[in-house]
Image (cartoon, rainbow, N blue to C red):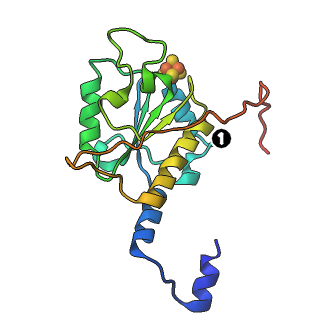
Amino acid sequence: MGIEAAISAEGFLTTQLKRVINWSRRNSLWPMPFATACCGIELMATASSRYDLARFGAEVMRFSPRQSDLLIVAGRISIKTMPVLQRIYQQMTEPKWVISMGACASTGGVFDTYAVVQGCDQFIPVDVYVPGCPPRPEQLIEGVMAIQRIIDQEGIPPKGPDGRRVPLGIALQPTHVPSAQPVPLGLG
Ligand code: SF4
């Protein structure tokens, strides 16, 4: 990283406290997975060795909202489930961020029915929308990186005059080009 060389030469570093806090915060996101359907499988794959979410410091999935600062909504949310999701969001520690993963979480997807919420952003503030049905792990990683960029630039998320969280509402573009299938597996 070069930091060891700088410390051994100079013996100290100067920076701003804000930068150190943002740097540590962006590299230690603890996701709260709220996976209700098939997108959850891609979320699990993202944490696997093949995609290695640990490279971004975000592999420590917590199942306790009080230990989490990144809510990943993966899958469709029924009307009955929404109060549970809201309760989990409220119990998470501040500052916190939200990724809506996949068409169902963001819009209800193909489930245009009375029982399915047509976008979780109607009930909780969503910062990054990850497109796809399902999104590939690379796309979810792009979403995590978008959150990291926000933390780098802004630090804590903004709040409105009423003290309520302002959602950042960043919609990722589907940039991933699929590889030819099947992808040969190998150890190399
Ligand atoms: S977006 Fe597609 S893959 Fe994800 S939960 Fe909905 S139907 Fe399943």
Could you tell me which residue is drawn at 42 percent across and 19 percent down? 108
Quarter of the image containing the N terminus?
A: bottom right
Task: Give residue 157's position: percent from left, percent from top.
Answer: 35, 52
Looking at the image, residue 144 sits to the left or right of residue 96; the answer is right
Residue type for callout 1:
Arg
The residue positioned farthest toward the bottom in the image shown:
10
As displayed, is residue 14 above or below residue 50?
Answer: below
Q: Which secondary structure, mark 1?
A: loop
Residue 131 in view of the camera:
yes
Could you tell me which residue is drawn at 56 percent across and 22 percent down? 133
Could you tell me which residue is drawn at 36 percent across and 42 percent down? 167
Looking at the image, residue 44 sits to the left or right of residue 5; the answer is left
Task: Give residue 8's position: percent from left, percent from top.
Answer: 60, 87
As displayed, is residue 62 above or below residue 42?
Answer: below
Is ligand 1 less than 8 Å from the beta carbon at label 1?
Answer: no
Task: Give residue 126's position: percent from left, percent from top.
Answer: 39, 37
Instruction: Please give the residue where the numbered disc 1 appears in the rendered image.
Output: 50
Tell me the crowding category of disc 1: few under 14, some 14 to 19, or many 20 or more residues within 10 angstroms, Cα based.
few
